[in-house]
């Protein structure tokens, strides 16, 4: 089934170095993205509510800039989710940009999902 690419942008009031740690490490991701995260090399295992772990592979990254993961179910496809830190050159404002793929028609649900996750992240960072 074909998925639709979605983009979301969130204003963040924190330092990029700190934000990156919450995006690229198992400990950081466990603070806001999943209940438990285990990192084995480039493979991250995410679990929620005591359920079985879902594997995502870190396929690209640039320190203090972005991380890109591909879920195991999407291997062999162009689908991924990416978390990118952007700093405005003029205002120095920092934002977190999300690129993800969802089923066609699920764009609103995807936005609500990410809105909730990023709200949790902003609370953890004191960046709300």
Image: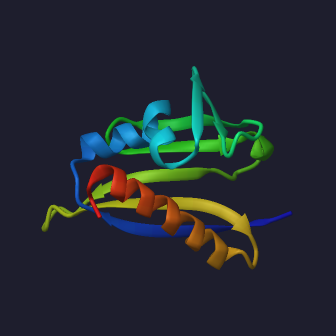
Left or right relative to 55: residue 19: left
Say which of 121 and 89 sits in front.
Answer: 121
Q: Residue at x 13, y 67 (%)?
A: 90
Q: Is residue 57 above or below residue 104?
A: above
Q: Position of residue 37 (x, y in %)?
A: 58, 34
User: For residue 96, which quarter of the picture?
Assistant: bottom left
Q: Position of residue 62 (x, y in %)?
A: 39, 37
Q: Position of residue 61 (x, y in %)?
A: 46, 37
Q: Residue at x 59, y 36 (%)?
A: 36
Number of labels in the image equals 0
Left or right relative to 127: residue 43: right
User: For residue 75, which quarter of the picture?
Assistant: top right
Left or right relative to 125: residue 99: right
Q: Position of residue 118 (x, y in %)?
A: 44, 60
Quadrant of the image for the N terminus? bottom right
Q: State the residue lying farthest toward the right.
A: 1
User: For residue 20, which quarter of the picture?
Assistant: top left
Q: Is residue 42 visible?
A: no
Left or right relative to 126: residue 28: right
Colour mode of the rendering: rainbow
Say which of 109 and 6 sits in front.
Answer: 109
Q: Is residue 59 above or below residue 11?
A: above
Say which of 28 and 96 sits in front.
Answer: 28
Q: Residue at x 27, y 59 (%)?
A: 127
Quadrant of the image for the C terminus? bottom left
Q: Residue at x 57, y 20 (%)?
A: 41
């Amino acid at each position: 089934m074909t998925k639709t690419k979605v983009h979301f942008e969130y204003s963040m009031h924190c330092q990029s170095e700190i934000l990156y740690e919450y995006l690229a490490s198992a400990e950081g991701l466990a603070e806001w993205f999943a209940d438990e995260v285990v990192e084995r090399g480039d493979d991250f295992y995410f679990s929620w509510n005591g359920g079985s772990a879902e594997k995502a592979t870190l396929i690209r990254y640039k320190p203090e800039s972005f991380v890109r993961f591909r879920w195991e179910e999407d291997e062999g496809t162009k689908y991924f989710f990416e978390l990118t830190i952007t700093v405005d050159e003029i205002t120095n404002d920092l934002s977190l940009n999300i690129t993800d793929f969802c089923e066609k028609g699920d764009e609103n649900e995807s936005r609500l999902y990410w809105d909730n996750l990023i709200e949790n992240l902003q609370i953890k960072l004191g960046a709300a």
